[in-house]
Image: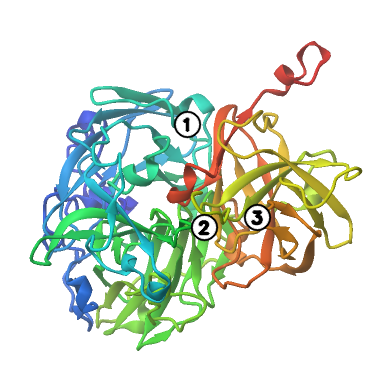
Amino acid sequence: MTAADSDETRSAKLNRRALLQGGAMVGLSTLAAAVPASASPSATTNSPTAFAPGSGGPEPSPPQLKLTKFADPLRIPPVLRPRRHSAYDELTVTMRTADVTLHSELPPTPMWTYQGTYPGPTIETTSGRPLRVAWENRLSGTIPIDAFDFYLDPGDAQNPPSNYPGTAGCQEVPGVAGLPPWAAVHLHGMLTGGGNDGWMENLIGPGDVQLSAYPNHQPATTLWYHDHTHHVSRYSVYAGLAGLFVSRNAEERALDLPDGRYEVPLVLSDRNFGLDGSGALTGRSLHKVGAVSDLRLVRPHAGPYTLVNGVIWPYLNVEPRWYRFRIVNTSNARYYRLVLMADGKPVPGALKVIGTDQGLLDKPVPVEGALSLMTAERVEVLVDFSAFRGTAVKLVNTLPNIAPGGRDTRDDLLEPDVMQFRVADRRPSGRFTLPAVVSPTFKRVTHEDLPHDHPQRWILLAPPLFTAGTPGVPELWEMNEVDSAGITFPTEGIVQVRDAQGNVKTLRRKAMVYDDGKAFTPEHGSWEVWNFLAIHIVPHPMHIHLSHLQVLSREEYDVTGFDRFVRGSTTPLKFLAATPTEPYGLGDKDVVRVGTSGVVQGGHGELVSVAVRFPVVGRGVYHCHQLEHEQHMIRPLVVTPAAHMHAGGHHH
């Protein structure tokens, strides 16, 4: 993915001044891999050294999908490095419309892109070096996707139309086809003030520039940038506006992790496509979602084609040695549970997580089951391929109720394969040893570490209102704790919760939609505890801007006391049991999964408490990062300097 120190030494004769022209430098180790967006995936080599490839090869996908799996090599996004000034670094990134080949058997796909590639180039920076980015909008035309939806008849529930390409039985979503190319770029996970966060209503049109300053005072980590245009991000991100951002520091370099061609980004996304009159794939992106019956219980988007770095079901030639993968889920809504499989069987412990959203963990965490990754989450993973020399292994997506590698059409998993690794049949190479300690500076936060007077926030994730004629979408409720005296139950917007100690809290809804009432107003530099209580069985990836967080606890709750029609509780929602968080989910994060992990259990909900720190100031938002939920599960927040909040002897 990036240039190793040794690679730079060998390439010292390159004219670095020339490479730096235009505000960016292509990573030296990726010069051979960077290709024009219109090139075929097969034109890109991912085998920079000559060696005998392992077994493996193309495989058929389900016949309705019409494309061959593992036919095209993985593409590596080009790398951009900023120009260095004395006090800050500087970079220009241009948005432009381009035709991108996602599979050699598929016509080129028109997309909105950063720098003409999908995903956009990987921006690589040094932690501690402030960065200024000019995001230039040179997009043209209307949004290059088709948006359709369908009603899901009960008889189709086991095999919904979202499993397949084409628009048969669907209707076009009004108002999408003519969307002009407005944009707002959000550098997801960057701890920057609200004025530089990519506020979703501060749009730039073609010819305009968004100027953003990023402090970049963060640990070595993997972030990503994407469009955040209010109301339509589910379409603009799907159109192609996404890319990676990598920050490096001395602590990371001291680990001597696999680098150069042995450090590989895996940017996950999914797509669907249209069909022409003959039934052939057109290559044009199709955003197709379903609604259950007349209640219009909207299903999040899930496309049947899995892309890695913009290539559908790619393969990667690897050597029998350690590799470092930066895995990022940029799908609109798909929840990945990744398993490495050899000879048709899972390989427990093969994936060793060393980092999450906001930096490195204290030690490697082997994944014994599936590696869970909700949309917008990131992990850094080490894999040793030396045990698989001369063979092919696969990365697959799975669900809790099926065996890894199996299909589940009910839950939009017609094709579980993600990609194939072809391991060279040669003597293992490399001298890397898995470190016992990854980040000595990482610290787990507990309740005891928080100030005794830290604020507590309550956010309830409510199920859809099942009433004919009302959009069937989940809701986000901000709650205040109140005295229960005089309240008649059930009452709309009032929910009682009985915790593990038997104490009952009464919570009253104070806000629900984006522009309801006063926003949460944390103090700059403060710690708070946010309690997300999910009544809906669908898991939600909750993202808080202007902050970073750690999971304190997960608890299972009996939520049968919630009346879905009255929209309040008849009896208190009751604590059932503490539930574990995956060990790799205990790191520094900016996205947290709230809700069941995929196993539907009627009447069961989840309370997730997170410690949140606010190191920057300004106006931001928090929201569900399932993009089909974002427009109705989003609320503003304003981080304010403490002195301003208490000015004049009053707390504002």
Task: Select label 1 or label 3 by which is in front.
Answer: 3
Whether residues under marks 1 and 2 lie with C-beta atoms below 8 angstroms apart, the answer is no
Work out whether residue 629 can be spotted: yes
Q: Nearer the viewer, residue 330 or 231?
A: 231
Q: Secondary structure at mark 1?
A: loop
**Residue 583: image location, x then y, percent:** 62, 66
Dot label at residue 197:
1
Whether residues under marks 2 and 3 lie with C-beta atoms below 8 angstroms apart, the answer is no
Q: Of marks 2 and 3, which one's residue comes earlier in the chain?
A: 2
Q: Quadrant of the N terminus?
A: bottom left
Residue 529 as seen in the image, left or right of residue 631: right
Whether residues under marks 1 and 3 lie with C-beta atoms below 8 angstroms apart, the answer is no
Q: Secondary structure at mark 3?
A: loop
What amino acid type is highlighted by mark number 2? Gly
Q: Residue furthest front?
A: 468
Looking at the image, how many numbered discs can be counted on the residues?
Answer: 3
What amino acid type is highlighted by mark number 3? Phe
Q: Secondary structure at mark 2?
A: strand
Q: Nearer the viewer, residue 518 or 364?
A: 518
Residue 70 as seen in the image, left or right of residue 104: right
277 vs 99: above or below: below
Task: Select label 1 or label 2 by which is in front.
Answer: 1
The residue shown at (40%, 63%) is 324
Say which residue label 3 marks: 565
Q: Quadrant of residue 166?
A: bottom left
Q: Of marks 1 and 2, which one's residue comes earlier in the chain?
A: 1
